[in-house]
Amino acid sequence: MSELALVRLLPDLDRLARAAAAHGLIGAGGDLGYALHAALTAAFGELAPRPFLLRAEIRRPEVLGYTRADPAELRETIRLLAIDFADVVEPLRLDHIEVRGLPTDWTAGRRLDFETRIRPVIRTRPQGRDGPTRERDAFLETLDAREPPPTEAPPHRAWPLREDAYAQWLARELGRGNAARLEIARLITFRRTRVLRRRVRPGEGRRRVESEGPDAVLRGRLQIEDSAGFAGLLGRGIGRHRAFGFGMLLLMPPGRLVDGK
């Protein structure tokens, strides 16, 4: 298996949105996560960058993602793969693809700054062990766990409480497999968004499902605890909805993000 590589694409988001809407790949909330998932899968098959991150707020929007393929392998995949959604794939502008390898040995003890877009939810079964699962905002779950229940926080206090809850959630995710330890995390943006999924239901085939939930961007600093565990974390991503634009760790040297240098 190839080592992990970082893929960078410069998509035409307006063209992508129009083509995706024609195929029913965008829900009422307008999120492009499912559309990008479909386009990347059509273009690259099993080598599709995943997890990935859409950075639409910068001057030249870009899609970043991790894959286990080298540039030649990716281009050969593009050339040979039968593309079902050519009009959705073309806005990815694959002729401008950039691919570069990542380190193969993540040294334990090394500190790195990061940025990540997450869906900080906790899966629960409100109707008992055999009932259906649901996703609940980790912030609300934290509030319910407090005794006695907190009073209604004024607006200027709500942000720190949410930031703390999401930092705790992120610390647990980073710690899986002893991959990394969270040192600091700051909540940069938060909103609640609706995202589209197509789920398979017995006897119903694939049906469109839109779910609403927390959508947060955090920046911070982590320390690598285990080299292999951290490499696995990068390739796997953080939390749920990783195939749809959440959970990618964008890494930078210390000071670039946290200290604003």
Image (spheres, rainbow, N blue to C red):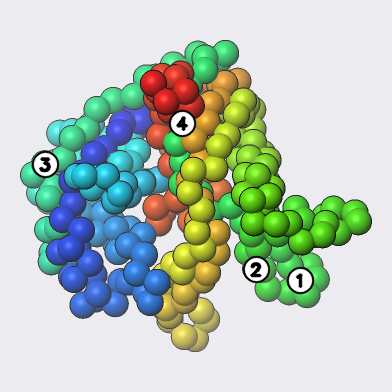
Q: Position of residue 207 (x, y in %)?
A: 43, 80
SS assignment at label 1: loop
**For marks 2 and 3 on the same chain, the one whose residue lies earlier in the sequence:** 3
Q: Which mark is residue 134?
A: 2
Mark pair 1, 4: CA separation: 34 Å
At label 2, counting other C-alpha atoms closer than 10 Å, the crowd grade (few under 14, some 14-19, many 20 or more) is few
Are the two marked residues, 2 and 4, in contact with CB atoms closer than 8 angstroms? no
SS assignment at label 2: strand
Q: Nearer the viewer, residue 111 or 241?
A: 111
Residue occupying the point 47% across, 65% down: 193
Residue type highlighted by circle 3: His
Badge 4 is on which residue? Answer: 114
Residue 14 in the figure: left or right of residue 145: left
Q: Nearer the viewer, mark 1 or mark 4?
A: 4
Report the residue that reaches farthest toward the bottom: 203
User: Looking at the image, is 166 positioned above or below residue 260?
Assistant: below
**For marks 1 and 2 on the same chain, the one whose residue lies earlier in the sequence:** 1
Q: Nearer the viewer, residue 260 or 182?
A: 260
Are the two marked residues, 3 and 4, in contact with CB atoms closer than 8 angstroms? no
Residue occupying the point 16% across, 40% down: 97
Badge 1 is on which residue? Answer: 126
Residue type highlighted by circle 1: Pro
Q: Position of residue 183 (x, y in %)?
A: 62, 25
Badge 3 is on which residue? Answer: 96
